[in-house]
Amino acid sequence: MTEELQAETGADEVRTIYTPIADTPTSYLREPEGAHPPPDFEGYKSTALRHPKQPLVYLPQTITEITGPQLGTLLVGETDNDLTVQHAGEPIGERIVVSGRVFDTEGKPLRGTLVEIWQANSAGRYKHRWDRWPAPLDPNFSGAGRCVTDDEGRYQFTTIKPGPYPWGNHYNAWRPAHIHFSLLGRAFTQRLVTQMYFPGDPFFPFDPIFNSVRDPKARERMVSSFSIHDTVPNWAHAYEFDIYLRGPGATPFEEEH
Amino acid sequence: MIFETTPSQTVGPYFAIGLPFDVGPFVVPDGTPGAIHITGTIYDGAGEPIPDFLLETWQADGDGHFADVHGHGGPSQLDGFRGFARYGLEDGDGSFDIVTVKPGSVPGLAGTIQAPHIDVSVFARGMLHRSVTRIYFADEVQANAGDPVLARVPVERRATLLAEPVEGGYQFDIRFQGPHETVFFAV
């Protein structure tokens, strides 16, 4: 994937690492319409009462928005990037490695940034008191992980492939298998929560959350790719998922809109 | 821009297994002199409390410094100041309670001064993207009058961004719809 990116851009600076202080942007690009799902999406019923109805007010990016929490390794415990070793026994399911890099939209990797994940077990059940559907809990699987990206912006988790699960949105509604991802980035402005999907999931056409992203190419950016390269012989198959956060704006102080 | 951003998706109903952490509600360590509680409730469009929200805040300390490693605004001198709170419960009732210090004024764009404020992100099942708002303080009348961001908000809606003084701190409710809908921002 990285080689492809370089080939596409032909630019060495794609691999350039940020110097945290000198290279921190003083503004971030405004995102185009349709980059994210609409706040009110008819197919996903719970959005109806949970979105602002008044127009959003334009917030200039001040110092509060271009800075952000830097938790570093504060929250990261020793086994937090391996969800298969957090209990006495091994969890049941397909052992997988999920890895990738966190970039901004200029292609610069974000190092030292917190990546948090949570997910259902292999049967599609979350270890959460309100998840009550009749699939088994796994005493050896909690389903939460954390890590911090390395100097190349890379993160890696070992986990169990989550199962799909039913939900009450409409008749025979099922969520495609997914892993939730949360990223703090470098700035309040870059904060992102998303979901990583698996290639070729048969539930894609029927899932309003996946399809709330209206641009098919944008949807593809939420789908991981199988990686034979990262697959560990006799141990775990692998998926690669790169994440792109908003990049720097063109000028230090954006114009009024 | 060479690449497009990864699209946002909802945190869903089960984020509590992964995101909250023990000291998440504490922007400053418990017992910090001058610490205040900011409490409130988040309401949906039917006026019902939203039990399964995740709230995050980001702010400067009392001197206007951020706990930011990138050098913007100068480092905070306040012991243990993270500038950041995260509040979300497996079994919530719609209310939140964070422990922090009142932020100081910080620079705005083009030589302006911003009144004390806290940036807020709200995530929940049914929200495909976070909602961003700001907490200002009702007792900062003069500073609020000169704030360049409040100046962009229609006068009749500004009160929705003002936290009211209460015993031990401030109260700030968030309403997603209805006649008193909170002002949300495009950042």
Image (tube, rainbow, N blue to C red):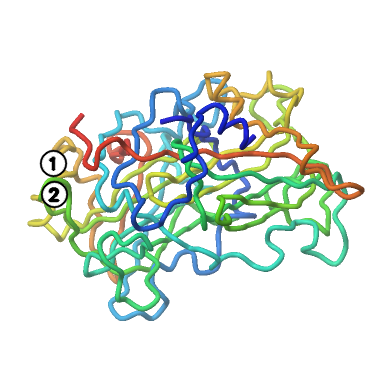
Quadrant that contains the N terminus of chain A: top right
Residue A104, percent across and down?
46, 41
Mark 1 Cα-neighbour bin, 10 Å: few <14, some 14–19, many ≥20:
few
- In percent of the image, x 85 and y 67: which residue is there? A88
- In the picture, measured across the screen, residue B61 lies left or right of residue A118, that is left
> Which of the numbered marks, if any, corresponds to residue B151?
1
Which SS class for mark 1?
helix
- In the picture, measured across the screen, residue B182 lies left or right of residue B131, that is left
Which SS class for mark 2?
loop
Q: Chain of mark 2?
A: B
Indicate the quadrant where residue B185 lies: top left
Quadrant that contains the C terminus of chain A: top left
- Residue B158 vs residue B151, the one in the foreground: B151
Q: Amino acid at mark 1?
A: Ala
Residue A91, percent across and down?
85, 54
Q: Residue furthest right?
A: A234
**Callouts 2 and 1 close, C-beta under 8 Å:** yes
The answer to whether residue A48 is above or below residue B120 is: above
Q: Chain of mark 1?
A: B
Q: Amino acid at mark 2?
A: Asp
- Residue B84 vs residue B177, the one in the foreground: B84
Residue A81, percent across and down?
69, 58
Mark 2 Cα-neighbour bin, 10 Å: few <14, some 14–19, many ≥20:
many
C-alpha distance separating marks 2 and 1:
6 Å
For disc 2, the marked residue is B147
- In percent of the image, x 35 and y 68: which residue is there? B100
The answer to whether residue A216 is above or below residue B77 is: above
Indicate the quadrant where residue A209 lies: top right
